[in-house]
Image (cartoon, grey):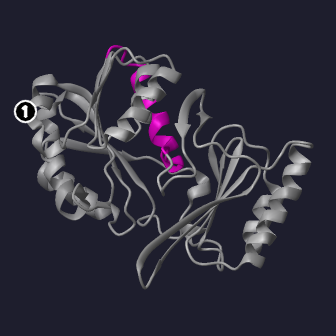
Amino acid sequence: MQALLNAIAAMPRPTDAQRIFHGRGGLYPGCEHWTLDAYPPVWLLTSFQPVDEAELAQVQAALARRWQDLAPGEPLNLVFQSRHIDDGGGHAETRVLAGAVPESHEITEDGARYRVQLLRGQNHGFFLDMVEGRRWVRRHLATRPGAKVLNLFAYTCSFSVAALQAGAAEVVNLDMASGALATGRLNHELNGVKPGAKFLAHDLFNSWGKLTRGGPYDLIVLDPPGHQKGSFIATKDYARVVRRLPALLAPGGHALLCLTTPKLDLAFLREVVATEAPGLDWLERLPNPAVFDDISPDRALKVVVCRRRDSDTA
């Protein structure tokens, strides 16, 4: 646990939402089950295996000491979530260890505002590891004003906010979860970019005709869950989506392909693109934030940029 304590002792005061410690990457032996995230003004400490109360109290005390140094007189707002698999299956418990934590609150990233919920479930409304993907969207679309974007598996629509802030004319957000899209609408309102955004609470695999009629798109973002029963299983469903991308993209259009599961490597994604969409050129893999470094790059988040060839070179 010492690596986690060291990270706490050295951390600066965060302003944007960000990960502070990533034991899950395997670089800190003995700390593989710990993560620490800042969702200012709230801290989220997560363990992926059971921990005893004495160990938990030690981490809380270290945070309290550091917070007193960084923000004298301000309360420490700390949530703890325990996630592990036991004989009864998956288990998650969330509790407030210190301070006052609202049901939801606003956080920021690169000047944008987003709504998060740390007390309910395992998904909090905002994925910290995707920050470089959102930054790439901003850079890419800043030189392509008026672009049309398709955001698949949009969740709470952070990619859409980034795209519209960068000058996109229209973003179509599709996700089966109407509750997540409701938060997505709020995120657009928080940033004053609701005009131009569309929200479709549809099953993607029953929506190809509607999406085709709405295209072609200058950018498609594909960020599905790795494994979500009844919705998407990457081993069989990723290929089903990728093979549709060339027909949905405008000539020269780009696709941002995200693969979140650690069980599938970069070679899987390369093979899917080569086999199912030979009209797409593989351009680059985006770097993950340094704090998310992993002992195995293939196990870490994979975010890749592809481009549809122009019609005269396809």
User: Which residue is drawn at the image coordinates 86% and 55% (left, top)?
Assistant: 66
Q: Is residue 64 above or below residue 24?
A: above
* Pointer 1 local density, CA inside 10 Å: few below 14, some 14–19, many at least 20: few
Comparing 79 with 113, the one in front is: 79
Q: Amino acid at mark 1?
A: Gly
Q: Position of residue 107 (x, y in %)?
A: 61, 36
The answer to whether residue 314 is visible is no
Q: Is residue 6 above or below residue 107?
A: below
Magenta stretch, main secondary structure class: helix
Residue sitting farthest toward the left: 209
* Residue span colored magenta: 125-146
Comparing 30 with 275, the one in front is: 30
User: Which residue is drawn at the image coordinates 60% and 26% (left, top)?
Assistant: 111
Q: Position of residue 293 (x, y in %)?
A: 56, 60
Secondary structure beneath label 1: helix
Comparing 177 with 265, the one in front is: 177
